Amino acid sequence: MIGFREFLTEVNLSSSFLEMRGPRHVGKYITPFLSKSGIEKTKRAFRGTGTPVEKIDSGGHGSMHDPKAASTHILGSEHNGHAAGTPIKITHVIHKDEKTILARTESHGDIPLSKIQKPKALATKRRGSYGFDIEGRVAKNLGIKAAGSSNKSKDFELDHPDQKADDKPTVRGRVKVVEKPKRKFVRGESKLEKGRFGVTSLQHKDGQWGFTGDPKMHEVFAKATVNGVSLLEHLNKNFPNGKITKGFRVTPHPGTAHHYLQQSDVNVLHIHDKSSGNSTTFTIGNSLKGRTSLGHLSHKEIGELDGTISVEPSAKGKGRIAHSPNIAKMRELAARSAEDTSHRTLENAQHGAEFVKGLRKIKLNEEMSVGAGVIAGLEPDTPPVPKGVTTKGSMLRRKKFAGKEVFVVSSDAFNKAKLGKKKFEHYSSYVGRDETGEAIRQYAKENRDAPIIIEDELTGAMVYLKYGKR
C-alpha cells in the first residue's frame, strides 16, 4: 500500500495529462534516453493530443541514448513486486486514456511515471526555489525575513524606521473607531524574468466558463479578446463541453501588468534575470518615487511589461489562466543596475544598506505623492481601474468602505483633516485644490447628506471628513 505523499504524486502525474505536466515530464526525463524508434512510437501514441510530446524531434536517438546500456532509469518506489532502486529499461511511453501515462519497459511491464526516479543527469532544482533564493538575498540585505512560500501577500516588507512594532493604524471618526491592519511602508515583490504577473483559475459550470480563485485579475482577464470577442465568450463558443483539449495564448488587455501591480499593492519591484544573473530594484508608483536610492520604473515602462496570457488545457472543466510578462523587457530592466550607476539592486548588500538608511530621511507623515492620491502605486493614469474604485481623472482614487464613499489623500491632507471639517470651512482648507480636493468638494455639493471618509495613502488610516445626516 502506498503512502499518502506517494499517492498524491501518482495522482498528480497520472491525472495531469491534459494539464501538460505529464507530457512535459515525458519530454524532459524519458525521451532523451530513448532510441529513434522509441521516440517515434511515443509520438504516435500521443498523436492528436495537442501535447508537447507531438513536437519532440524524432530525427535521431535521444541525447542521452546509449544502445549498450542495460537500463535507462531506476524505480523511485516499489511497483508490482519490484523494489525501489530496481534498474529498468524504458522502450517508449504510452497513455491509456486522458488521465494515465505509462512507461513501457523491456522486462518490468508498464509503469506509471510517478514510480520512476528522475535521472540525476537531468534533475533540476525544485521549481520556485531559485526565486526563493533571490527573495532571501534581498531580505537579508534589508535586515528582514523573506516571505518564501508562506501565505504572506508580499515577497518582502519593511516598516518605516519611525514606525513602532506595536503601531495599530485605525479607521477613526470623531466617535466611531474601527481597527484596520497596519500597512507596511515598503511593500516589495521579487520577480524572475519569466515570473508571472497574475494567475487565476477557470471553471466550467452550468454550461458556462467563468473565473474562480484569486479575484484580483478577473476583471482585466475578462477584457482580453480573441478574434474580436471576449476571452470567456471564446471559451464558451469553442469549448462548450468544458474540455480545453489544447492550450492557447492571448494578447493581454493593455494595462494588465499595471493592474497586477496595483492590485498587489506594492511600491517596490525587484527584477532578476536568471539567464544573466543581472538584477535591478525599482520603486513604482508615487509613494517612494525619487525619495530613495532606487531608480524608478515609469508608467510607460510598466505598460511595456504586458506580455502573453496563457490558457492551459483542461480535461475536467477546470483550468488555469496566467499572464506572463514581456521577457525581453524584463531582461532589459534587470540589466539596468549593471549598465547605469544611478540604478541599484537590493541583491547587493551595500545597495540594500543605502536603501534602508535613506528611509530614515523620509518623514513618516510626508506627502508622498504631490497632489496625488495614489497608494498602491501606479502613476495616476494607470488603466484599467480596479473593481470598486472610480476615477475622474489621472490623479483621483476613490473606493467604498462599509457602503460609504472613501477618497484616498496624502498624509499631509489627512493630518489636516483628521479632526473633521468645521462648519463653514472650505474643503480646500483641508484637502487642497488638486483633483482629489476638487472631487471631494463636488461630491459634497452633489450629496449634501452623505458622509465622506478620507484615507491616508501611507498608513491606510481612515477618518470621517464629514459624517452626513443619519
Image (cartoon, grey):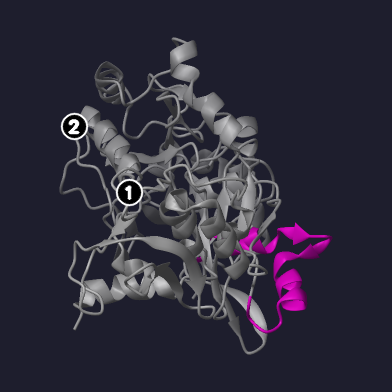
Circle 2 or circle 1, nearest the eye: 2
Question: What is the three-letter code of the residue carrying label 1?
Answer: Arg
Reading the image, the residue beneath label 1 is: 183
N-terminal of the pair, mark 2 or mark 1, is: 2
Is residue 251 in view? yes
Front-lying residue, 90 or 128: 90
Question: Does residue 185 lie above or below 241 as drawn?
Answer: above
* In the foreground, 109 or 238: 109
Q: The residue tagged with tag 1: helix, strand or loop? A: loop
Task: Say few, some or many: other residues with alpha carbon within 10 Å of mark 1 (under 14 / 14 to 19 / 20 or more).
Answer: some
List x then y, in percent, for residue 402: 46, 70
Quarter of the image where the N terminus is located: bottom left
Indicate the position of residue 312 as horizontal and vertical percent values.
Answer: 58, 64
Residue 40 appears left or right of 25: right
Residue flagged by tag 2: what amino acid is it? Answer: Gly
Q: Position of residue 215 (x, y in %)?
A: 51, 66
* Residue 291, above or below 201: above
**Image quadrant where residue 432 sits:** top right
Segment tinted magenta in the rendering: 215-243
Query: In the depicted view, which residue is nearer to us: 27 or 241?
Result: 27
Residue reaching furthest right?
Answer: 228
- Which residue sits at x=26%, y=64%? 75
**Which element type, helix, strand or loop, lies under badge 2?**
loop
Q: Which mark is residue 156?
A: none
Does residue 131 sit above or below 346 in this rendering?
A: below
Task: Work out whether residue 46 can be spotted.
Answer: no
Q: Quadrant of residue 53?
A: bottom right
Residue position for label 2 = 143
Question: Is residue 87 rendered to the left or right of residue 402?
Answer: left
Q: Is residue 161 magenta?
A: no
Tell me the residue at 49%/36% (across/down).
193
